[in-house]
């Protein structure tokens, strides 16, 4: 529970005593303390929030502008942020606009909507490339920190691998709320280090803090794990997809999303399918056989499932993608596919964590052979063409355009309740979000100008 947020949302509508008494009661729901202490805590939060609100009347208009949020008046949940659908993609493109406004260049930046970012390091001899990626732990794995740590680490390593880089280090940012048991920290780290040991990539740095400091009570765990990779070759980003390329995919058994689906729907045996490092094995095979330099693009099937990834690749490159549905289904782990079908979850709309490769025809057989030789199943699932849209071809030859839903396929009961229907006012929501992003860019530019003018 965010007690500071609780106060900020009610301080203008409730009498101070009523607000203090209400907050004190809520605090006691989480903490084993007496009435006097809970009231003192509540009053302290009210006093601190009241003090910060005085910035508005301080007379410092520039500070007031900096501390005010450029409101979009659209919530994260309503916009579907984090739910890997069209609303989420739209917001990520606005974030990319802010990044691009810095005019600080890189080989691959968020504008490409790729898995990781890449910078080129010039050298007197050969240039080399550094890839960085970061992933957040699945929100529903807070109470399963070992599994959360395992899957978020594997996810960030995937994001480095698909840019054609060889992972060399991992870092962890771990936040546990005030009432969380310290054992969660160790369990999460053990999950991270399990992957580290299996793929021989060290955890080298990190940070451990409380969620919101004193202002968030409860035991929620949130975290991110990042990774760094290096390569002598340019990145295998999505923009490399070319008409005539072959689409290959490895078998996927899912990660955090499939684990969450299994745990919260009672398919506990499926959790074991997800505990593997097949993706990294496949990537290493490509490195070891010196195939990376010839691959046009790689991605992991995660963001909104194949629907989302296909849409993003087509949008970024302008090419068309033709997929064979029967081939795709054959490359989803049998237990996972059965669970998804039982629960009426679209396999094309959730993260299966497969490796998708976009390769020129002349090396496709060699790629298949290299990956198969390390025990990872792989097959052709389609082709790249010039039709400018992603399409799914059924066994009878019929075609449908692959379009991402507003949210990824619902895989828990609460997600099914919320649904994936696009809001009627989505276009207005996008306008408001765009305006807020532009206001943030203007604020950034004003602060930079102030610092430059006032620096020694």
Image (cartoon, grey):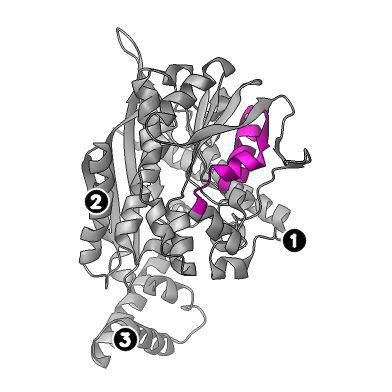
Left or right position of 60 against 320: left
Q: Earlier in the sequence, mark 1 or mark 2?
A: 2
Secondary element at tag 2: strand
Q: Residue at x 58, y 40 (%)?
A: 309
Q: Residue furthest top?
A: 125
Q: CA distance from mark 3 to mark 1?
A: 41 Å
The reply to whether the C-beta atoms of the residues labelled 3 and 1 are less than 8 Å apart is no
Q: CA distance from mark 1 to mark 2?
A: 42 Å
- Residue 342, image x and y in percent? 59, 63
Magenta span? 305-334
Secondary element at tag 1: loop
Secondary element at tag 3: helix
- Could you say which is closer to the camera, residue 208 or residue 182? 182
Q: In the picture, which quadrant includes the N terminus?
A: bottom left
Judging by the rendered image, the residue that carries numbered circle 3 is 28
Q: Main secondary structure of the magenta part?
A: helix
Q: CA distance from mark 2 to mark 3?
A: 29 Å
Is 332 inside the magenta-drawn segment?
Answer: yes
Q: Residue at x 25, y 37 (%)?
A: 201
Judging by the rendered image, the residue that carries numbered circle 1 is 424
Q: Residue furthest bottom?
A: 35
Left or right position of 189 against 61: left
Q: Residue at x 50, y 56 (%)?
A: 69
Residue 115 showing in the rendered view: yes
Residue 207 circle label? 2
- Residue 197, image x and y in percent? 22, 42
């Amino acid at each position: 529970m965010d007690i500071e947020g609780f106060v900020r949302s009610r301080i203008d509508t409730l009498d101070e005593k009523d607000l203090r008494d209400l907050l004190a009661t809520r605090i006691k729901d989480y903490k084993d303390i007496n009435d006097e202490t809970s009231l003192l805590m509540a009053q302290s939060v009210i006093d601190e929030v009241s003090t910060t609100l005085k910035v508005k009347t301080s007379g410092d208009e520039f500070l007031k502008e900096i501390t005010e949020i450029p409101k979009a008046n659209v919530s994260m949940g309503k916009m579907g942020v984090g739910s890997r659908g069209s609303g989420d993609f739209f917001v990520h493109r606005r974030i990319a606009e802010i990044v691009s406004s810095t005019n600080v260049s890189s080989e691959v930046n968020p504008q490409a909507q790729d898995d990781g970012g890449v910078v080129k390091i010039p050298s007197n001899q050969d240039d080399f490339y550094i890839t960085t990626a970061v992933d957040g732990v699945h929100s529903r794995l807070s109470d399963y920190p070992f599994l959360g740590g395992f899957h978020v680490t594997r996810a960030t390593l995937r994001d480095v691998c698909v840019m054609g880089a060889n992972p060399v280090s991992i870092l962890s940012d771990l936040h546990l709320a005030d009432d969380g048991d310290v054992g969660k920290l160790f369990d999460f780290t053990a999950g991270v280090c399990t992957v580290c040991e299996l793929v021989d990539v060290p955890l080298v740095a990190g940070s451990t803090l409380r969620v919101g400091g004193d202002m968030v009570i409860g035991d929620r765990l949130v975290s991110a794990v990042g990774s760094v990779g290096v390569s002598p070759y340019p990145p295998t980003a999505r923009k490399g997809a070319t008409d005539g390329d072959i689409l290959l995919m490895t078998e996927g058994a899912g990660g955090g999303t499939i684990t969450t689906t299994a745990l919260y729907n009672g398919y506990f045996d499926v959790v074991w399918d997800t505990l593997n490092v097949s993706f990294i094995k496949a990537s290493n095979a490509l490195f070891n056989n010196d195939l990376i330099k010839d691959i046009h693009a790689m991605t992991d099937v995660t963001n909104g499932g194949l629907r989302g990834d296909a849409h993003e690749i087509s949008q970024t490159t302008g090419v068309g993608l033709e997929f064979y549905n029967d081939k795709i289904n054959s490359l989803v782990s049998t237990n996972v596919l059965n669970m998804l079908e039982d629960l009426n979850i679209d396999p094309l709309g959730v993260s299966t964590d497969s490796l998708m490769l976009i390769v020129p025809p002349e090396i496709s057989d060699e790629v298949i052979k290299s990956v198969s030789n390390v025990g990872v199943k792989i097959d052709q699932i389609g082709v790249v063409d010039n039709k400018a849209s992603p399409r799914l071809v059924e066994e009878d030859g019929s075609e449908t355009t692959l379009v991402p839903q507003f949210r990824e396929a619902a895989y828990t009961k609460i997600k099914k309740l919320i649904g994936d229907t696009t809001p009627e006012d989505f276009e207005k929501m996008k306008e408001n979000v765009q305006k807020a992003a532009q206001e943030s860019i203007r604020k950034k530019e004003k602060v930079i100008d102030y610092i430059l003018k006032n620096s020694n």
